[in-house]
Image: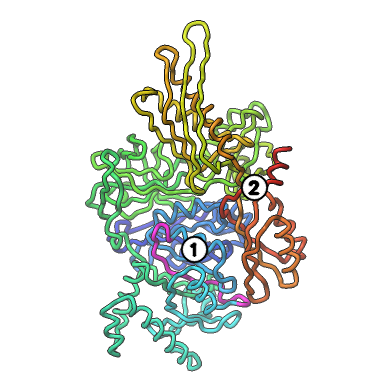
Amino acid sequence: MAQQPVKTTNRNVPIDKIRNFGIIAHIDSGKTTTSERILFYTGKSYKIGDIDEGNTQLDWMDQERERGITIVSAATTTFWKGYRFNLIDTPGHVDFTAEVERSLRVLDGGVVVFDAEEGVQSQSETVWRQADKYRVPRLCFINKMDKLGANFEGTVEEIRDRLGANPVPLVIPIGKEDEFKGVIDLIEMKAYVYGIDPTGVKYETLDIPEDLKEAAAAARAHMIEKIAETDDALLEKYLNGDEISNSEIKKAIRAATIGYKIIPIFCGTSLRNKGVQPVLDAIVDFLPSPNDLKVIKGEDPNTGEEVERRLVNEEKFSALAFKIQLDPHVGKITYTRIYSGTLEAGSYVYNASKGIKERVSRILLMHANTREEIDKAYAGEIVALVGPKDTKTGDSLCDENAPIILEKITFPEPVISLAIEPKTKADQEKLGYVLQRLADEDPTFRVSMNHETNQTIMAGMGELHLEILVDRMKREMGMDVNVGKPQVAYKETITQEAQAETKYIKQTGGHGQYGHVLVKIRPLGRGEGFKFVNSVKGGAIPSEFIPSIEKGVIEAKEKGVLLGYPLVDFELEVYDGSYHDVDSSDMAFKITGSMALQEAAKKAKPILLEPIMKLEITVPEDFMGIVIGDVSAKRGRISGTDRKARAVVIHAHAPLAELSGYATNLRSMTEGRGVFYMEPSHYEEVPANVLASLQSK
């Protein structure tokens, strides 16, 4: 059980003193370690949590502590120098990308952590793109400066080159690897040297060492030049050679960070308790408060017009539900970001996405898996609500008299699935309930039924994702299941236009069945999904039957036409048909729609698509040739290699179908010294020989 949090005081701080931010990074960059140090230095915890000892506060699940990874994003509230921090620690593993996606959607700022030796890694690029998508201002912390091969300047260059960012170091390191002692603050031109206190709470503020004075002066001049480029008044002063005060520098950095013009860079080592406090000050000084973002835009569900809410307490209430969690003691908890207005426990809110009213019985402030009950929540807060039953991830909550639907959260499609069944027949009903609970929590987890084999299929973002879900079913819900082999989530699509005319006529005693449609099918771009177009003129098919045709098409597209995989990226247009006054019905037209899709798709040259994974494999140089050969044998394409310290990083793309058990293969090929990272990239057509072997199975 996590240590009880310090009681939160002075909750209703002015809105300009709130900072909603997340810690985001590649796996093993030190995110959770950095988060634990933030809790310790801000007085939220009395003891520094350690991943290796399994006593972290934010990694509270048994599976997280056993594996030393973050699986679910954990929210907490703490204070630093009178400012309120609402902090979310997110997972680094790509299988849990939904946790990062939904956290970034509701945060105002981000702290991106990098490993000083590894630099910018694949997942670093992924989380960076996610932060770009939601326009989240951020600063960077180059961690693990004490590690062998740590390279501050090299990592800054990679942030510029690989992420297309404009990094501006606000500190430079004093030493590196085992000589790393602290940092030089380029604004104050002071050295912060750690070592007098093992916890890092106390450190010395000294003059810059003689041997670093020249480097610090050059770095400060570079910093001022980069900042002046973002501010006309400052640029004029800089070009005239006028003195620029520290307060002017800070003000300009803040404006440029919030305006996505620069990325402030810091460095340190969280594990050795060095360099974290300057990051806390930077969160206060440079990341936005809800006040800086001024308004949130949305849509009026009744008129479809754009509406705005000012991010203040006096405005009408609006909020976004960004995460559902099922708690064994409290029941369903809805994590919510309040954008405007206030919310009282015991009141009702309007779910504009569903068009229903929901009662909020209790409001909780979360600290990982412990909680503190509060009576009222204010604009800018991240809280958990108990009471709403039908609210899902991404739903907008608001005042019934001023409805607003906020921008939704988008999630990637699952790429892998497996069949499961309960160990006993008696548990069949319970299995459905358990899977529904997990699907409510996790938007990237899908459940379906294969009616031909009568198996339940669960789909997710990767083998680890599904493994953790099966483990949770057993531990949290007492549900033992038999698990099949992971299967690749293939998809089907079409490559050309086609037409079909379909009639469904069935005569029985009494009323018969009659449906008749003419359809055109067209391919869409990869990832565009499915569009249904009704262009029937003159009432050839009565309008009340059109939704039934669409339903039939939607059902049929899930079964595909080649190997039973979902049909994607196409448009189906119904342009003509006929009906019978007596025999036509919703059911008849639904069956006709289903048959019409099958017939048209078969004529449109259907193909099978497979998920292609982006691979980043780090191996000692001696094994580079054998690993590249193995990737090529797996139908992989090498896109490049990088040299890093004592290793080579191989960048490649390969089909997921060929990568089953790759971790074991790589270990045996490299004497246990190779590591890899994999994330979904895109879908590609399956080669003819592979399709033939799949069809013969």
Q: Which residue is mark 1?
A: 35
- Write the residue at 44% across / 39% down: 531
Above or below — where is 78 with respect to 597?
below
Tell whether position 527 is magenta.
no
Residue 357, by quadrant, is top left
Quarter of the rendering occupied by the C terminus? top right
Tell whether position 144 is magenta.
yes
Q: Earlier in the sequence, mark 1 or mark 2?
A: 1
Mark 1 residue type: Ser
Give how far across and how far down residue 415 sits, in percent: 59, 47
Residue 84, by quadrant, is bottom left
As drawn, the label of residue 686 is 2
Left or right, 241 with reference to 677: left
Q: Nearer the viewer, residue 308 or 246?
A: 308
CA distance for labels 1 and 2:
43 Å
Give how far across and how far down residue 505 sits, in percent: 51, 16
Mark 2 residue type: Val
Asked if residue 262 can be seen in this view, the reply is yes
* Secondary structure type for disc 1: helix
Magenta extent: 132-149
